[in-house]
Amino acid sequence: MSVLVVSTGLGSPHTKSLLLAREAERILRADSTPVTLLDLRELTLPLCGTTESFSHPNTARGLELVSAAEAVILATPIYNYDANAVAKNFVELTGKGWKNKTVGFMCAAGGHASRMSILALANSLMMDFRCLIVPRFVYATGPAFAADGSIVDPEIAARIAQCARATVKLAAAAKSLG
């Protein structure tokens, strides 16, 4: 079972969505699950719909990584009641690779008011690519993180582990059904 963890926050090296992604990666490695972390700060992607968008080598690399994974965990900041534009652009560019994937979500947000906002992207993945969405997702706000970037909220730490492991279990169950 191979898992791709994608961090879509383009901020500093301590962007909260990247911290969530790194923790999920750490947990999966500790569980001996093959995992790849894709930090989209390190894979500059064109804007979908531009002339070069689907022929760009970084688009090909992203598509290759999504296609090779059996499950994807998407770690994204929430902006204006939705996943950030980087997450949506990544899905648009790599769409062919998402077909029938199991997908988990980890969200970093400024407040609690938009905790259900990831459902728009989840619905799109279900409808367009027949993805199986993990019903347990992470939604973390500022107080879950210390100034040094560590995750200090034990409930959020537990939810990251639950989300990562549930993604693996659900993907394995789906694979066994053929």
Image: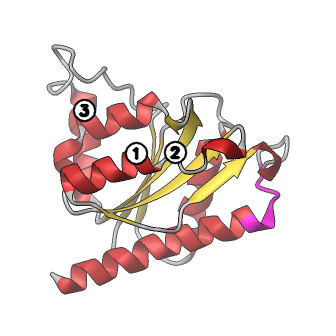
Picture mark count: 3
Q: In x, y percent, where is residue 157?
A: 71, 65
Please state which amino acid type lies under the numbered disc 1: Ala
Residue 152 magenta-drawn? yes
Residue corresponding to mark 3 = 59
Please state which amino acid type lies under the numbered disc 3: Thr
Residue 44 vertical placement versus 64 (above, below): above
Residue 52 magenta-drawn? no
In which quarter of the view is residue 48 placed? top left
> Residue 161 or 121: which is nearer the viewer?
121
In which quarter of the view is residue 126 placed? bottom left
Q: Earlier in the sequence, mark 3 or mark 2?
A: 3
The answer to whether marks 2 and 1 mark residues whose Cβ atoms lie closer than 8 Å is: yes
Numbered circle sitting on residue 152: none
Query: How many residues crowd around disc 2 within 10 Å: few (fewer than 14), some, or many (20 or more)?
Result: some
The answer to whether marks 3 and 2 mark residues whose Cβ atoms lie closer than 8 Å is: no
Q: Nearer the viewer, mark 3 or mark 2?
A: 2
Please state which amino acid type lies under the numbered disc 2: Ser
> Residue 109 or 86: which is nearer the viewer?
109
Q: Main secondary structure of the magenta part?
A: loop
Measured Cα–Cα span from mark 2 to mark 1: 6 Å
Q: Secondary structure at mark 1?
A: helix
Numbered circle sitting on residue 117: 2
The answer to whether marks 3 and 1 mark residues whose Cβ atoms lie closer than 8 Å is: no
Task: Please report the bounds of the magenta region as a residue range.
Answer: 150-155
Query: How many residues crowd around disc 3 within 10 Å: few (fewer than 14), some, or many (20 or more)?
Result: many
Residue corresponding to mark 1 = 120
Residue at (27, 62) in percent of width and height: 101
Q: Is residue 35 left or right of residue 146?
A: left
> Residue 80 or 157: which is nearer the viewer?
80
